[in-house]
Image: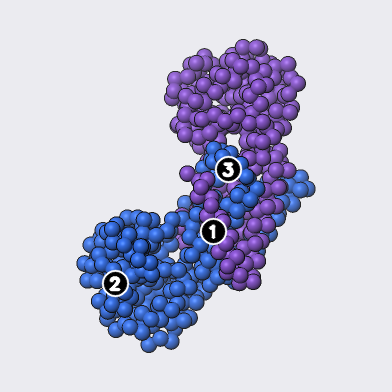
Chain colours: A blue, B purple
Amino acid sequence: MFNTVTIVGVGLIGGSFSLALKDYKLVNKVIGVSRSGATAQRALELGIVDEVLPLEEAVQQSDLIYLAIPVDVTLPVMKTILDLMNSNQIVVDAGSTKQALCKLVSDHPNRGRFVASHPMWGTEYSGPDAAVHDAFRGRTCVICEREKSDPDAVELVEKTYSILGMSMVNMDAESHDVHAAYVSHISHITSFALANTVLEKEREEDAIFELAGGGFESTVRLAKSSPAMWGPIFMQNRENVLDVLNEHIMQLRKFKSCLEKENYDYLQELMENANKIRRILK
Amino acid sequence: MFNTVTIVGVGLIGGSFSLALKDYKLVNKVIGVSRSGATAQRALELGIVDEVLPLEEAVQQSDLIYLAIPVDVTLPVMKTILDLMNSNQIVVDAGSTKQALCKLVSDHPNRGRFVASHPMWGTEYSGPDAAVHDAFRGRTCVICEREKSDPDAVELVEKTYSILGMSMVNMDAESHDVHAAYVSHISHITSFALANTVLEKEREEDAIFELAGGGFESTVRLAKSSPAMWGPIFMQNRENVLDVLNEHIMQLRKFKSCLEKENYDYLQELMENANKIRRILK
């Protein structure tokens, strides 16, 4: 499908995307671009990329450029790439926020060559060692502002994601960011905050280590996520995240009030309502 | 090891304990006791129990009586069982709170025949169909007030849990309830509240369903847990749970304040601190 693909950011998402392209034989050569020499070296060692080059050289040789870097860094780097590109190349980003980026590039002469995508997959790990094979199968990929991408570009990107096992959803950038705040960003904040709660209050760490069952691990594992990746996401999506966070604090206060007032009936009602999430979770 | 064991409450925990006793050939016959005829019938169908009897008859025939019912119901039922028991029988409870129960039975003439245990395992499912084989392997089991149980009783219970693959930890009931609030109870409250947050604000359920990645499922899955089981736990442990909940709301407010003030440095600091949970999670 592609002769040469450049992956900008060879970590969890970029690394997994590269592995998938190779596994499904969709690419001849993958070039890695990274700000960190150590990261680039590790990606080479792991066979995630075949070569490491500076951004400009890499872009010149590539049919497809795939950005999977912190969303704040994506903005200037995307601008640079669009300036360098010709009309046969395609650039895709995989970031967790879409509004700021789509707005930034909206008037660029090469806007049509850009496909705004968000493959809804991730783990709490980061860096090239976090990349896994067949990461995207069975997950959803959001494409934003599909109509602003050239048909050949967006169709090829959709075909690629489909081969990797993803189902496609179209959404405007604003809706994407609202939904992402609910189904992803708030989970990370509650998990970070829960970790801080336990670390603050529970000094006997051996006790946590020994006692923590599956429930604790499950709700707190996202607290291991990369601050460099998540800080910019929360900042770019701060209005939506604040909306959800305020609602979440209000919901927690309801539980608090039930306990304080020993209002058992309302406590049951809150939990029974929460059980409705069964309809949504697979 | 046992001739006849009675399981009071043949759901997630009681059912899994029964399956484990059978799988490891530690029992000849398991009698089930349940308030619900349908539940008892289902436990029979699934081979979790061999017979269903009323509590009193079941206790009379049993070497070991194992209670795995909501912690509020445990209190009167434990009292009834202790009144019925002779000095060769053992009664064990598997509840998530220990202080109220240990206090209740502290002066009972048969206190020595009681072993207060909390096997630290569970899932968000409930009822006989939630019971699984080999559930306890690799998990920790807390024994409270070990010194108040007769040596033969507590040693046999510990030996049983050990054969099922659990490592044993001793703790006073008060410490248990503090730690349980941190490593288990708060996770359930945040998960219930997170589910309510999303259900309240996000009316487009199809969007959640399609977009929710592994992170969302992981933080919210405990919201599927049984209100009948968890309400009494929160109530019996309300002071500890309120302590942790207040701290958690305070930690969430720190994230909120960072976002409101666009204080990126402090946001990074909060997340980096949360990353320390890596030390604790396996």
Secondary structure of the residue carrying numbered label 1: helix
Residue type (three-letter) at the residue carrying disc 3? Glu
Kindly indicate whether the residue at mark 1 contacts the one at mark 2 (C-beta within 8 angstroms).
no
* x and y percentages locating residue B63 in the rendered image: 57, 15
Q: Residues within 10 Å of mark 1 (few under 14, many from 20)?
A: some
The kind of residue tagged 1 is Glu
**Label 2 or label 3, whichever comes before in sequence order:** 2
Residue of label 2? A53
Residue sitting at 76 percent across and 48 percent down?
A260
Mark 3 vs 1: CB contact within 8 A: no
Residue A261 coordinates in the image, percent (x, y):
78, 48
Disc 2 packing (10 Å; few <14; some 14–19; many ≥20): some
Q: Residue at x 53, y 66 (%)?
A: A231
Per the model, the C-alpha gap separating discs 2 and 1 is 31 Å
For marks 3 and 1, give the CA distance. 18 Å
- The answer to whether residue B62 is above or below residue B129 is above
In the rendered structure, the answer to whether residue B189 lies left or right of residue A103 reads right
Q: Chain of mark 2?
A: A
Q: Which mark is residue B272?
A: 1
